[in-house]
Image (tube, rainbow, N blue to C red):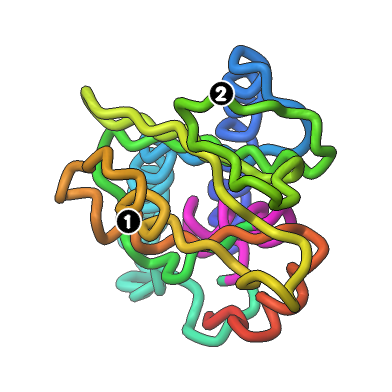
Amino acid sequence: MYECYRIDMVSSMSSASYVEGKEVAKEMGCTGFTVYYNSDYYYKTEDLIDTVHDHFEALSYKYGCGPMELPRDFPKGDIRNTRYASYNTGVNSALRGTGGSMIDWTIPPPKGFKMLFDSNCMGLNQYPPSMGEEIPGEPSLFDSAVHIQYQGWSFSHRLPTRMDPTRYPVSVHLMDVIRSSGKGYPKELEALLDNFDFYAINVGKLYTDAHPLKY
């Protein structure tokens, strides 16, 4: 019963995040597929899991069958960890189907971190120069983008996700883009920002085959 509730808790928080993300994407004029990350949902999920886990343990004492020593998390190697281990794995599941990847989903985010990934898979979004200049002569119509907010810092930038792996790298590392922009970033975000890759959807299998999920 606890394991079923645990799946429902992660799924419900992921759904709430998805709905909020759609509103954010609409307000920003993004088209096509987007993925939203809000660290508030990570901590709400973790708090809820702890609360329900402790409640089940308390019930075992109340009815004279405790301690159950109920595992809080799914065991390592359990396939449910690919989506229902935490809010992070819920987001990562969406990312890996949309053009991105969280390399290590166990890293907790700093509180107050929000990110919207715009896959721009239809090639409809035209990004302003402030989000990074197009590379002359390069097919940048399908470039994707990230919009990040953290306390007083924000970062909106084009991601050069290319569709031709014979000419360009399969993936783009988020920290490489941020460093090359010269805009700076809060140092406490470094571990999290260093944890995201992005790629064009048509080369997704090349990336995911080379970076299988470790659960």
> Is 29 placed left or right of 113 in the picture?
right
User: Considering depth in this image, is 66 or 51 the residue closer to the camera?
Assistant: 51
Range covered by the magenta-colored residues: 82-99
Q: Is residue 48 magenta?
A: no
Determine contact: label 2, label 1, CB under 8 Å. Answer: no
Where 167 sits versus 120, above or below?
A: below
Residue at the farthest left position: 187
User: Residue drawn at (22%, 42%), measured in percent from left and top?
Assistant: 184
Reading the image, the residue beneath label 2 is 128
Q: Is residue 74 left or right of residue 162?
A: left
Task: Characterize the local packing of mark 1: few (<14), some (14-19) or many (20 or more) Cα atoms within 10 angstroms.
Answer: some
Residue 199 position in % (x across, y down): 65, 61
| Residue 139 shown left or right of residue 91 in the figure | right
Residue drawn at 56 percent across, 23 percent down: 128
Foreground of the two, 152 or 69: 152
Measure how far apart labels 2 and 1 are at the Cα level.
26 Å
Q: Indicate which disc residue 192 carries.
A: 1
Give the percent coordinates (x, y) of residue 204. 74, 68
**Disc 2 crowd, CA 10 A, few/some/many (<14, 14-19, 20+):** few
Residue 86 shown in magenta: yes
**186 or 168: nearer the eye?**
168
Identity, as a three-letter code, of the amino acid under mark 1: Leu
